[in-house]
Image: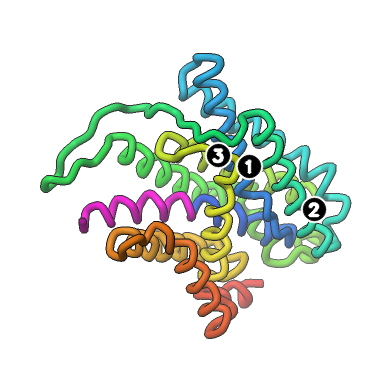
Amino acid sequence: MLLDIIISTLINGSVYALLAIGFSLIFGVARIVNIAHTAFYMIAAYCIYFITNSLNLHPLLGMLTAIVLVTLIGLISYKFFIDPIREHEAAVLIATIALAMILQEVMLLIFTGDFLSVPSLIKGYMEFFGVRIAFQQLLTIGVALVILAAVWVLLRKTRLGLAIRSTANDREVANLMGMNVAQVAMMTMGVSVALAAFTGAVVVPLTILNPHMWMHPLIMMMAVVVLGGLGSIKGSFVGAYILGMAESLVVFLIPMGSFLKGSVALSIMILVLLIRPEGLFGVAFEEER
């Protein structure tokens, strides 16, 4: 059971980290609370299903196509629905909720409400201390960690990363330094949605597809962001694995725990808001700004 908890923690934590970091990036740069973020994750999963099952193409090709397509959809959505009202935070929040519901209903119309699945990229399993670990699980963990490492390199070692961090720290100073803040926000939105699409591609062989599959990751992502500190990349990473472990412990150790994992995440989020509203790394983030 301990090994099951560790594997589940690594998978869930990595997925929540990818989603939360993407969410934190666009919030930090453009102050956009993008409720539709996990809906893009859902769209990517359905794109892979369509390309794999309906067009009979290789799942890897479906994943690459889905990432590009969903990123384009995210950029178009930002340009025409979010950017014109970006300075009005309440309007942006309502618009992203509406966008998420629209994407959900479109998937419901196209694919109905049936539960669907995508075959694993790698078949088989290995036994470790009597516990069966699927090769697909190991592949998912490995790819997720590689993507997280690539995001770190992007933010720390590239000019785009420097622009994103500078704009997140202080938009006015970044603008005075000659940066095109609007263009940086657009590019950050692309990176954010691409991370959501990557997450959908990574997790789709291990999950069941349905038009409401974006809601639970949304709850967990918001809990991670609140726990780590809103806008803090480091906080999103650490908070994701903390909540991933909490979720795994609840599922494996408590009877009927799979029905309680969402409630546990929300309870942790409420406690953090009451005890330390800025989150684990919120103070450091504010000091950087």
Residue that mark 3 sits on: 210
- Callout 2 amino acid: Ala
- Give the alpha-carbon distance from disc 1 to disc 3, as whole Å: 13 Å
Between 250 and 15, the one lying in front of the other is 250
Q: Earlier in the sequence, mark 3 or mark 2?
A: 2
Question: How far from the left and from the top, in percent, is residue 178?
Answer: 80, 55
> Could you say which is closer to the camera, residue 40 or residue 190?
40
Give the secondary structure at mark 3: loop
> What residue sits right under mark 2 in the picture?
95
Left-right relation of 1 to 207: left
Residue 89, percent from left and from top: 80, 64
Task: Report the colour scheme.
Answer: rainbow
Q: Residue at x 74, y 40 (%)?
A: 75
Task: Pick whichever, 259 or 230, lies toward us.
Answer: 259
- Residue 177: image quadrant is bottom right
Q: Of the residues shown, which amino acid type is indicated by label 1?
A: Phe
Dominant secondary structure, magenta: helix
* Residue 283 seen in the current view: no
Residue 143 horizontal side relative to residue 51, left or right: left
Alpha-carbon span between mark 1 and mark 2: 15 Å
Residue indicated by mark 1: 40
Seen in the picture, residue 284 relative to 81 is either above or below; the reply is below
- Magenta highlight range: 1-16
Mark 3 belongs to which amino acid?
A: Asn
